[in-house]
Amino acid sequence: MGNEMRYVDLSCSEFAARLASKDAVPGGGGASALVAALAAALSNMVGNLTVGKKKYADVEEELQNLMKKLEVLRVELLDLVEEDARSFEPLSKAYGLPKETEEEKRHKEEVMEICLHNAAQVPLEIMRKIAEIIPMTRVFADKGSVIAVSDAGVSAALCSAAMRSAALNVYINTRLMKERKYAEMLDAECGSLLEVYCAQADHVYADVSGRLCTK
């Protein structure tokens, strides 16, 4: 983005203030990507608290390999915070296009369709990245340091929330698409990711919670 301001370079308080403002971006998609990036970071924290300890020597190589993958995903998700903002801005402008004449109506529909396609792709890609993280939260919950098991559970919970949140940002765009077969294809992938991976993440959270709760 050159010298252009990046939302992920803002302080936490500045990002939250931007999110709370009436500005169109950042929005729910970017927030979902950021939460998912935090989930990846938390799982990596569990790894960093585990590797190098004699007690966990037999799983060290496995966890180190996963940590490398998580670091790549964390960076990619932060990039998707920016990409979500870039993809939504043209759509927000398209909503304001005139539609007084038939020609203007046709032009607006064409532009809207292109913008809706682009805007739906980013949150769907966020969901795909989260789907890569979730199985790793299980490994860190099962094999990571017991002193950080709660963080593995938090990572899974954040993944579940981010996945569901990103899905809403897919659906709000697909519902307006004129090309219904394409919209239904995106919705189907979205639904499948939700069904498979949210269940996995919720199971990890429930397992960690069960291990920690005294009641």
Image: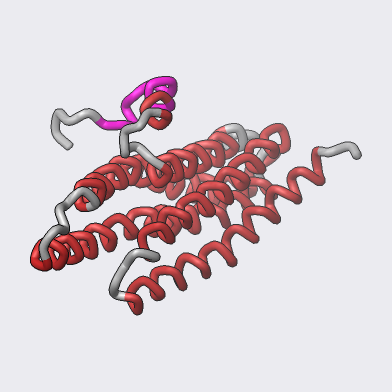
Q: Residue at x 39, y 75 (%)?
A: 185
The single residue placed furthest to the front in the displayed view is: 100
The reply, left or right, for residue 137 in relation to residue 115 is right
Q: Position of residue 106 (x, y in %)?
A: 14, 67
Q: Nearer the viewer, residue 209 or 162?
A: 162
In terms of image quadrants, where is residue 208?
Answer: top right
Q: Is residue 195 above or below residue 169?
A: below
Q: Quadrant of residue 149?
A: top right
Q: Nearer the viewer, residue 17 or 197?
A: 17
Q: Residue furthest bottom?
A: 181
Farthest residue, direction right: 215
Stretch in magenta: 6-16
Total labels: the figure holds 0
Q: Residue at x 91, y 39 (%)?
A: 215
Return the x and y of residue 157 as percentages of the image width and height.
62, 45
Q: Identify the residue at image location x=32%, y=27%.
A: 9
Where on the picture, by quarter, is residue 125?
bottom left
Q: Nearer the viewer, residue 188 or 53?
A: 188
Q: Residue at x 49, y 37 (%)?
A: 38
- Residue 120 on the magenta span: no
Which secondary structure dominates the residues rendered in magenta?
A: helix
**Looking at the rendering, in which quadrant would you find the N terminus?**
top left
Asked if the magenta segment contains residue 13, the reply would be: yes
Location of residue 17 with respect to 171 vertically, above or below: above
Scheme by which the image is coloured: secondary structure
Position of residue 163 measured from the top left corner of the image (x, y, whole percent): 51, 53
Residue 136 drawn above or below residue 56 = below
Q: Position of residue 41 (x, y in %)?
A: 49, 37
